[in-house]
Amino acid sequence: MERTEVTTVREMSDAEYELLYWHIDNAGRARAIELSDGSVLLPSMDPEGNGAGYFDGLPADTDQVVGETIETVRPDNTFPNTNAHRPAPPKIELSNGIAIVPLADPEGNGPGTLVQIDGEKIYQIGFQSN
């Protein structure tokens, strides 16, 4: 992923849920991070893309991340109990030091992955454990 700037943090749209065949659960809509290159990052609950996840570390005051540059996206090897079947989630590190990690749910019951929508293309951003 090239270095890009966070332009907006918002709830996922109905169109994004439909595109990914996800449903809105009782925890509400997942958050989306829009980037300056026009793509959108979404949290997935698992590597299979079975549904929306949760962004841990994303501040309630999203002004803290809007305008910041993504410096790195790398595995969060500090996440417990990751292995070949549960790879470490990606950690998004911003220029102001904030780190955002996709998890399976708000309770942190498992690692998540990132989904990037770029136009009509969908990518999963994840890492295999060593």
Image (cartoon, grey):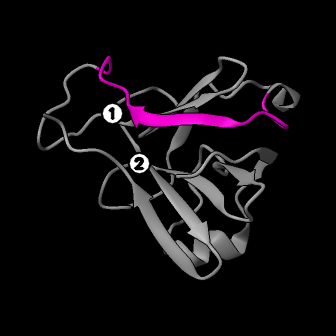
Using the rendered view, name the quadrant where residue 70 is placed: top right
Q: Quick check: is 93 in the magenta stretch?
A: no
Q: Position of residue 87 (x, y in %)?
A: 23, 39
The label on residue 92 is none
Q: In this picture, which residue range is highlighted in magenta? A: 65-79
Q: Position of residue 80 (x, y in %)?
A: 25, 19
Residue at point 49%, 58% (across, down): 115
**Discs 1, 2 touching: Cβ within 8 Å:** yes
Going by the numbered disc 2, the residue's amino acid type is: Met
Q: Residues within 10 Å of mark 1 (few under 14, many from 20)?
A: many
Tag 2 residue: 45
Horizontal arrangement in the rendering, residue 8 relative to residue 51 (left or right): right
Q: Residues within 10 Å of mark 2 (few under 14, many from 20)?
A: many
Residue at point 13%, 34% (across, down): 130
Q: Nearer the viewer, residue 44 or 6?
A: 6
What's the magenta bit mostly, secondary-structure-wise?
A: loop
Tag 1 residue: 110
Secondary structure of the residue carrying numbered label 1: loop
Q: Position of residue 94 (x, y in %)?
A: 65, 28
- Going from N to C along the chain, the mark reached first, 1 or 2, is 2
Secondary structure of the residue carrying numbered label 2: loop
Q: Nearer the viewer, residue 1 or 79?
A: 1
